[in-house]
Image: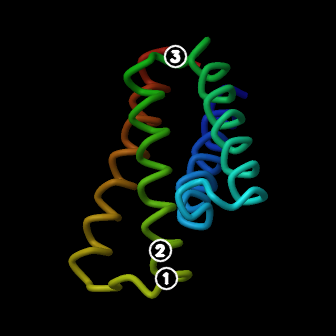
Protein backbone atom coordinates (compact mmCIF):
# COMPACT_ATOMS: atom_id res chain seq x y z
CA UNK A 1 0.00 0.00 0.00
CA UNK A 2 2.82 2.55 0.65
CA UNK A 3 3.88 2.34 -3.00
CA UNK A 4 0.34 3.12 -4.11
CA UNK A 5 0.30 6.15 -1.80
CA UNK A 6 3.63 7.21 -3.27
CA UNK A 7 2.42 6.83 -6.87
CA UNK A 8 -0.74 8.84 -6.14
CA UNK A 9 1.38 11.47 -4.35
CA UNK A 10 3.43 11.76 -7.53
CA UNK A 11 0.29 12.24 -9.59
CA UNK A 12 -0.88 15.01 -7.28
CA UNK A 13 2.57 16.55 -7.62
CA UNK A 14 1.95 16.67 -11.38
CA UNK A 15 -1.40 18.31 -10.67
CA UNK A 16 0.00 21.08 -8.55
CA UNK A 17 2.98 21.72 -10.80
CA UNK A 18 0.71 22.13 -13.83
CA UNK A 19 -1.81 23.99 -11.67
CA UNK A 20 0.75 26.68 -10.89
CA UNK A 21 0.73 27.60 -14.59
CA UNK A 22 -3.02 28.23 -14.42
CA UNK A 23 -2.91 30.30 -11.22
CA UNK A 24 -1.15 33.14 -13.05
CA UNK A 25 1.00 33.94 -10.03
CA UNK A 26 -1.74 32.86 -7.62
CA UNK A 27 -3.97 35.67 -8.83
CA UNK A 28 -6.81 33.39 -9.99
CA UNK A 29 -8.83 32.04 -7.08
CA UNK A 30 -10.10 28.64 -8.25
CA UNK A 31 -6.86 27.45 -9.85
CA UNK A 32 -4.98 28.68 -6.79
CA UNK A 33 -7.25 26.81 -4.36
CA UNK A 34 -7.04 23.62 -6.42
CA UNK A 35 -3.27 23.90 -6.73
CA UNK A 36 -2.78 24.43 -2.99
CA UNK A 37 -5.10 21.48 -2.26
CA UNK A 38 -3.10 19.27 -4.64
CA UNK A 39 0.10 20.37 -2.89
CA UNK A 40 -1.29 19.41 0.49
CA UNK A 41 -2.60 16.05 -0.68
CA UNK A 42 0.67 15.27 -2.44
CA UNK A 43 2.79 16.05 0.61
CA UNK A 44 0.45 14.19 2.95
CA UNK A 45 0.50 11.05 0.78
CA UNK A 46 4.29 11.31 0.52
CA UNK A 47 4.55 11.48 4.30
CA UNK A 48 2.29 8.43 4.69
CA UNK A 49 4.40 6.48 2.19
CA UNK A 50 7.57 7.45 4.06
CA UNK A 51 6.38 5.54 7.10
CA UNK A 52 7.41 2.37 5.23
CA UNK A 53 9.61 3.47 2.34
CA UNK A 54 13.08 4.93 3.02
CA UNK A 55 13.15 8.72 2.68
CA UNK A 56 15.72 8.78 -0.13
CA UNK A 57 13.83 6.25 -2.20
CA UNK A 58 10.43 7.82 -1.57
CA UNK A 59 11.60 11.32 -2.41
CA UNK A 60 13.44 10.20 -5.55
CA UNK A 61 10.39 8.30 -6.80
CA UNK A 62 8.01 11.16 -5.91
CA UNK A 63 10.07 13.75 -7.75
CA UNK A 64 10.69 11.35 -10.65
CA UNK A 65 6.99 10.64 -11.14
CA UNK A 66 6.33 14.37 -10.93
CA UNK A 67 9.09 15.29 -13.37
CA UNK A 68 8.07 12.73 -15.98
CA UNK A 69 4.37 13.46 -15.56
CA UNK A 70 4.78 17.22 -15.83
CA UNK A 71 7.07 16.87 -18.86
CA UNK A 72 4.49 14.68 -20.61
CA UNK A 73 1.66 17.05 -19.69
CA UNK A 74 3.75 19.96 -20.93
CA UNK A 75 4.03 18.22 -24.28
CA UNK A 76 0.30 17.55 -24.41
CA UNK A 77 -1.09 20.78 -22.95
CA UNK A 78 1.49 23.40 -23.85
CA UNK A 79 3.00 22.00 -27.05
CA UNK A 80 6.45 21.66 -25.46
CA UNK A 81 9.23 19.89 -27.33
CA UNK A 82 8.71 16.24 -28.23
CA UNK A 83 12.31 15.86 -29.34
CA UNK A 84 13.59 12.27 -29.32
CA UNK A 85 16.46 13.02 -26.92
CA UNK A 86 14.04 14.62 -24.47
CA UNK A 87 11.83 11.54 -24.54
CA UNK A 88 14.85 9.26 -24.10
CA UNK A 89 15.90 11.28 -21.05
CA UNK A 90 12.41 10.90 -19.58
CA UNK A 91 12.67 7.16 -20.17
CA UNK A 92 15.92 7.17 -18.19
CA UNK A 93 14.06 8.75 -15.27
CA UNK A 94 11.35 6.07 -15.57
CA UNK A 95 14.08 3.40 -15.58
CA UNK A 96 15.48 4.92 -12.40
CA UNK A 97 12.06 4.87 -10.73
CA UNK A 98 11.52 1.23 -11.70
CA UNK A 99 15.03 0.38 -10.53
CA UNK A 100 14.46 1.98 -7.13
CA UNK A 101 11.22 0.07 -6.75
CA UNK A 102 12.84 -3.24 -7.67
CA UNK A 103 15.82 -2.65 -5.39
CA UNK A 104 13.49 -1.68 -2.57
CA UNK A 105 11.69 -5.03 -2.92
CA UNK A 106 14.90 -7.04 -2.88
CA UNK A 107 16.23 -5.26 0.20
CA UNK A 108 13.21 -6.22 2.26
CA UNK A 109 11.48 -2.83 2.32
CA UNK A 110 7.73 -3.00 1.78
Residue at 39% of width from left, 30% of height from top? 103
Q: Tags 1 and 2 in contact by the CB under 8 Å rule?
A: yes
- Between the residue at mark 2 and the residue at mark 3, the CA separation in whole angstroms equals 33 Å
Lateral position of residue 38 relative to residue 76, left or right: right
Query: Which residue is identified by label 2?
Result: 74
Quadrant where the C terminus sits is top right
Q: Is residue 48 above or below residue 79?
A: above
Q: Is residue 22 above or below residue 103?
A: below
Q: Which mark is residue 109?
A: 3
Q: Residues within 10 Å of mark 3 (few under 14, many from 20)?
A: few
Residue at 56% of width from left, 57% of height from top? 20
Q: Which mark is residue 78?
A: 1
Q: Residues within 10 Å of mark 1 (few under 14, many from 20)?
A: few
- Between the residue at mark 1 and the residue at mark 2, the CA separation in whole angstroms equals 5 Å
Lateral position of residue 37 relative to residue 99, left or right: right
Front-most of residues 3 and 45? 45
Q: Is residue 103 above or below residue 55?
A: below
Q: Secondary structure at mark 2?
A: helix
Amino acid sequence: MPWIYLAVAGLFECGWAIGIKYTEGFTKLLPSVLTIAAMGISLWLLSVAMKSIPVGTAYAVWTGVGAVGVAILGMLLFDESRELMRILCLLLIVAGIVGLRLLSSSSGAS
